[in-house]
Image (cartoon, grey):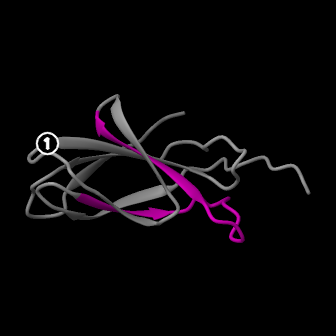
């Protein structure tokens, strides 16, 4: 078994749907994620710096039980192996619930 250096690239995240109390996002794995393993994602969402963590192996995720007319920040990290640390964060999405159209802002994180 070789030594794993882990994921060094960030995942790409986009908003698919916004409702009054939910946001559905789509995740594209990082460029350096191995195609032969299941990727684990850590989704951090909430108000700036007051994040709720959610882990998943899915690439389409719906965040529920949100507050209406509230701006949420969404960040995603990825890892390929259980013993790895999560890789760098995605760009931050700023999404407001209860909007009729899918509008959001991407804040580019600098590491």
Query: Is residue 96 toward the left or the right of residue 110 in the image?
Result: left
The residue sitting at 34% across, 28% down in the picture is 49
Residue 32 x, y percent position in the rendering: 67, 59
Residue 7 x, y percent position in the rendering: 67, 50
Residue 14 x, y percent position in the rendering: 36, 60
Query: Is residue 31 toward the left or the right of residue 62 in the image?
Result: right
Q: Which quadrant does the N terminus fall into?
A: bottom right
Residue 13 x, y percent position in the rendering: 41, 57
Q: Which quadrant does the C terminus fall into?
A: top right
Query: Is residue 97 toward the left or the right of residue 8 in the image?
Result: left
Q: Is residue 16 above or below residue 4?
A: below
Q: Quadrant of residue 100?
A: bottom left
Does 64 appear in magenta?
Answer: no
Q: Nearer the viewer, residue 67 or 109?
A: 67
The residue sitting at 35% across, 35% down in the picture is 51
Bounds of the magenta span? 23-47
Mark 1 surroundings: few (<14), some (14-19) or many (≥20) residues within 10 A: some
The residue sitting at 52% across, 53% down in the picture is 41
Q: Which residue is mark 1?
A: 70
**SS category of the residue bearing label 1:** loop
């Amino acid at each position: 078994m070789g030594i794993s250096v882990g994921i060094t690239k960030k995942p790409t995240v986009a908003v698919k749907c916004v409702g009054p109390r939910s946001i559905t996002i789509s995740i594209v794995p990082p460029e350096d994620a191995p195609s032969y393993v299941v990727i684990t994602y850590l989704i951090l969402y909430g108000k700036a710096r007051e994040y709720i963590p959610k882990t998943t192996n899915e690439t389409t995720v719906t965040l529920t039980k949100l507050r209406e007319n509230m701006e949420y920040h969404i960040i995603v990290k990825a890892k390929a192996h259980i013993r790895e640390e999560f890789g760098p964060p995605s760009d931050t999405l700023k999404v407001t619930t209860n909007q009729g159209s899918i509008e959001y802002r991407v804040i580019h994180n600098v590491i």
